[in-house]
Image (tube, rainbow, N blue to C red):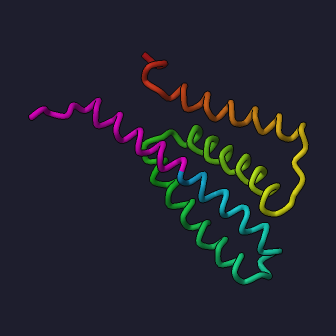
């Protein structure tokens, strides 16, 4: 039987926090798409969906931010939501997505990945 060190607990907690942050981002995409589909909250099913996704994204984000710094966590969450809403909005809601927009969304993705890498212990040691 081996004892779990504090460092191992922190690593495990940090991994779980990043997973919750990713989940919060997915919920944020659902929220954004639901708000778009609700047509200013005049379509009941989309409005209910927006409310559910809103609560889910806030919960998951709050759990993630117990471990991840607020500035980093919020930036990653917003980036996931923005990119996901733009991509899935073009597919599901028939919204346009130009090449120029896709390039700038790629910049956001690179920034989000870079933020995650900057938070890893290998780069910080």
* Residue 74 located left or right of residue 107: left
Farthest residue to the top: give it. 125
Q: Which residues are magenta?
A: 1-22
User: In which quadrant of the rendered image does the C terminus lie?
Assistant: top left
Vertical placement of residue 50 versus 2, above or below: below
Residue 5 is inside the magenta segment? yes
User: Magenta: predominant secondary structure element?
Assistant: helix
Residue drawn at 86 percent across, 61 percent down? 94
Residue 31, percent from left and from top = 67, 64
Q: Residue at x 73, y 63 (%)?
A: 33
Query: As displayed, is residue 29 above or below residue 80?
Result: below
* Residue ranking furthest to the front: 91
Closer to the camera, 73 or 85?
85
- Measured along the vertical axis of the image, is residue 58 above or below residue 107? below
Horizontal relation, residue 98 to residue 66: left or right: right
Which image quarter: residue 111?
top right
Could you tell me which residue is drawn at 82 percent across and 55 percent down? Answer: 90
Q: Is 97 contained in the magenta span?
A: no
Q: Position of residue 6 (x, y in %)?
A: 25, 32
In the picture, the quarter occupied by the N terminus is top left
Residue 85 image position (x, y, % from top left): 74, 54
- In which image quadrant can residue 47 be found? bottom right
| Residue 115 as seen in the image, left or right of residue 19 | right
């Amino acid at each position: 039987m081996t004892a779990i060190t504090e460092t191992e607990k922190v690593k495990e907690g940090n991994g779980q926090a990043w997973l919750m942050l990713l989940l919060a981002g997915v919920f944020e995409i659902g929220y954004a798409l639901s708000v778009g589909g609700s047509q200013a909250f005049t379509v009941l099913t989309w409005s209910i969906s927006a409310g559910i996704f809103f609560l889910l994204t806030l919960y998951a984000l709050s759990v993630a931010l117990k471990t991840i710094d607020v500035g980093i966590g919020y930036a990653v969450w917003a980036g996931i939501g923005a990119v996901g809403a733009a991509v899935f909005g073009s597919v599901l809601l028939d919204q346009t997505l130009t090449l120029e927009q896709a390039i700038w969304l790629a910049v956001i993705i690179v920034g989000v990945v870079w933020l995650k890498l900057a938070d890893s212990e290998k780069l910080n040691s």
